[in-house]
Image (cartoon, rainbow, N blue to C red):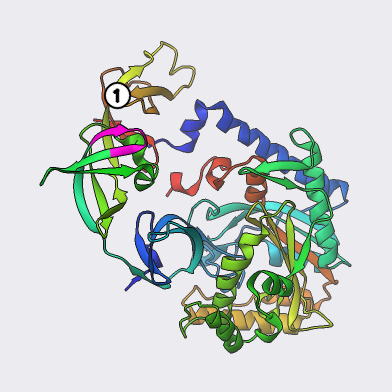
Amino acid sequence: MFKNWQLLKDDPAKKEKFFQRAKIVSLIRDFFVQEDFLEVETPSLVRLPGMEPYLDPVKTELVIGGKAEGGYLVTSPEYAMKKLLAAGFPKIFQICKSFRGGEEAGRLHNPEFTILEWYRAGADYRNIMEDVENMFRHIAGRFGNGSSKIVYQGREIDFSPPWPKITVREAFQNYAKIDLDTALDRDSLFAAAAAKGYKISPKEKFDDVFFKIFLNEIEPCLNQAKPVIVYDWPAGLAALSRKKAEDPRYAERFEVYAGGLELGNAFSELTDPEEQKERLLEEREQRVKSGKNVYGIDEDFIAALSSGMPASGGIAMGVDRIVMLFTDSKNIGEIQFFPAKDIF
Amino acid sequence: MASTQDIKRGVVILWKNDPHLVVEFEHIMPGKGSAFVRTKLKNLKSGKVLENTFKVGEKVDLVDLEKRRVQYLYASGDKFAFMDNTNYEQFEVGVEVLAGFEKYLRESLEVILLFSDGTPITCEFPKKVSYKVTEAEPGVKGDTASGRVTKEVTMETGLKIRAPLFIKEGDMVIVNTETGEYAERA
């Protein structure tokens, strides 16, 4: 069986994608430098990784003073970057590796992947939506023939702003015919799903059924002529984001979809240290229940919020997925030199 | 009862009371949600293809199919003829039953056909198949120095794959039919 690097040797078309990848990454960097963002580097190796209930941080070990000390690889640089917001860096971005141990290598996932995160102080998720649109306009205008349109897997996508934006509530109404306002608790969502013929086991959680409906009925409708922004998620699905002032059942979170790929996830960041701690404790409890690795809350992160983190918007995007779009690659392995399947 | 761990291409599950063939599947992790399996399912009664996304660990009903070991005879048009060597019964199947594996057929190759109510639905194709190489450019001095690792070679059936430089005309090579890649010299 050939490794990817061996196949690259004799295939100029396969090789070309890596020149395109480098070009895209440099265009991303250009864009943020031009927008006066500071590029930062934060640790990949930490003591206390993200608390997201469904992610599996990769466990490792280091030796300090002759003693073995447990460590983890980050699932995202989020906590560290928010500490830098609190430290007084108002516009920061980072392109780095992140690691998610539980994500089976496949068409869309690789356990080690490249993430792009940026944060803006004095801003909220609406400003981040504009950043996303402008960044894609910047890349598309300087990549290939400079057109705002690309073809991904046989379908044209036009990146010219503005992009269609739809609330999660509208998406459930339009595509799944469910009034989410009346289905925000476990029992009523289960009833709504069961009425539509979903088989639901009593062991399942709100999130499970929510995503079952989202993935079956909504996500397939998001592969449109332009990328789509889906915003205002149920508060329970947005542990690091600020609740909407006018309707606290929803939180200021959005996701971006293009060409059937989920590209990124953004928040108006939660800055209240007590509420943040409470939500992390709830997520920790979920980790305990589902048998995931359990570790403490990063108190340093809570301390940073307590010291006065400014109101901010921030986002994490998959760089590999952005590259897949622009290089018309069906599989993530086509745009990574050493996909996990060549290593493990 | 089976679960989503058993879902793979070629498996038949009972879905909304009808048998459905799994045509495609992939694992997905929605933003900050648990793991799911997205599938394309073909209804074996109506022929309709639909998509469904299962939560990993969800229970599914597998449908048992009758398996028959058959030998490949020939292709005529878009039909492929096979024979069951135990009773010499012959079958013609369409390209959809072979689901992409048709390009790996070679004379007298044995495969398993799976039947539902007497109709062939899908096949289990051997993971490794050997072929005779009928065309391979001769190795050139300097190939290795220039860093080349692979070259294109053509099999007796017309199948083309990339193989190591040392493979020459007349060699038998084994191809992995799941990846379409060279596996080893036979």
Q: Is residue A134 left or right of residue B86?
A: right
**Residue A193 x %, y %:** 56, 80
The residue that mark 1 highlights is B156
Going 67% across and 36% down the picture, which residue do you hit?
A: A20
With A125 as the anchor, is B22 left or right in this view? left
Query: Residue A80: within the magenta?
Result: no
B77 drawn magenta: yes
Q: Is residue A335 visible?
A: yes
The kind of residue tagged 1 is Glu
**What secondary structure is the stretch in magenta mostly built from?**
strand
Q: Is residue B132 above or below residue A284?
A: above
Which contiguous range is marked in magenta?
B73-80
How many residues crowd mark 1 within 10 Å: few (<14), some (14–19), many (20+)?
A: some
Q: Which residue is at a point 51% across and 45% down the rendered structure image?
A: A339
Say which quadrant the N terminus of chain A sits in. top left
Examine the rendered structure and indicate whether residue A143 appears above or below residue A234: above
Q: Nearer the viewer, residue B109 or A282?
A: B109
Splitting the image into 4 quarters, where does residue B92 fall? Answer: top left
Q: Secondary structure at mark 1?
A: loop
Residue that sits furthest to the bottom in the current view: A187
Residue closest to the eye, A105 or B81: B81
Give coordinates of residue B183: x percent, y percent. 33, 35
**Front one among B132 and A312:** B132
Query: Residue B59's spot in the image, x, y percent?
Result: 39, 73
Query: Which x, y percent locates residue B24?
Result: 45, 54
Q: Is residue A103 visible?
A: no
* Direction top: furthest residue: B141
Chain containing the residue with disc 1: B
Identify the residue at horizontal 68%, vertical 86% (top origin): A182
Left or right, residue A209 beside residue B157: right
